[in-house]
């Protein structure tokens, strides 16, 4: 996976990312902040659930399940790729 700004939904399992920004209005940003997600946070994609299910993200020792529509609106920068 190349480095740069990409959508969280497109990140492989096990990849470490830095949250860059959120797409959406202030209510959406507030909702993500309530989940404990902020721009600048480091996170790891634990797994993508099958059949379009949620993305499981680990941030500061917490695991957060995000629906695919929400994950598609979170922009991240890849910091370390998953080992294959």
Image (cartoon, helix red, strand yellow):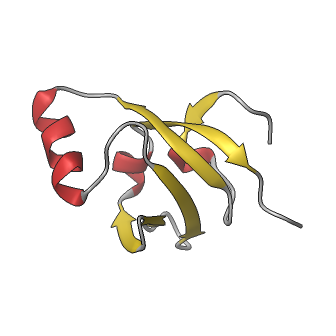
Report the residue at 33% width, 28% height from top.
Answer: 23
Which of 5/38 is in front?
A: 38
Q: In this view, does 42 lie above or below 14?
A: above
Residue farthest to the left?
27
Residue farthest to the right?
84
Q: Is residue 42 above or below residue 53?
A: above
Report the residue at 66% width, 41% height from top.
Answer: 78
> Looking at the rendering, which quadrant does residue 15 occupy?
bottom right
Report the residue at 36% width, 59% height from top.
Answer: 67
In the rendered image, residue 54, in percent from the top left (x then y), is placed at: 42, 66
Report the residue at 51% width, 56% height from top.
Answer: 43
In the rendered image, residue 1, in percent from the top left (x then y), is placed at: 80, 42
Locate the C terminus by quadrant: bottom right
Which of 40/22 is in front?
A: 40
> Looking at the rendering, which quadrant does residue 30 occupy?
top left
In the rendered image, residue 13, in percent from the top left (x then y), is placed at: 67, 64
Total tally of numbered discs in the picture: 0
Q: Taking 55 as reference, is 69 left or right?
A: left
In the rendered image, residue 57, in percent from the top left (x then y), is placed at: 46, 64
Q: Taking 41 as reference, is 1 left or right?
A: right
């Amino acid at each position: 996976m190349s480095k740069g700004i990409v959508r969280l939904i497109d990140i492989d399992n096990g990849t470490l990312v830095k949250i860059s920004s959120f797409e959406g209005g202030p209510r959406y940003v507030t909702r993500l902040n309530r989940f404990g997600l902020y721009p600048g946070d480091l996170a790891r994609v634990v797994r993508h659930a099958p059949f379009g299910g949620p993305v499981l993200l680990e941030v500061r020792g917490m695991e957060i399940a995000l629906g695919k529509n929400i994950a598609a609106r979170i922009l991240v920068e890849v910091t370390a790729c998953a080992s294959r």
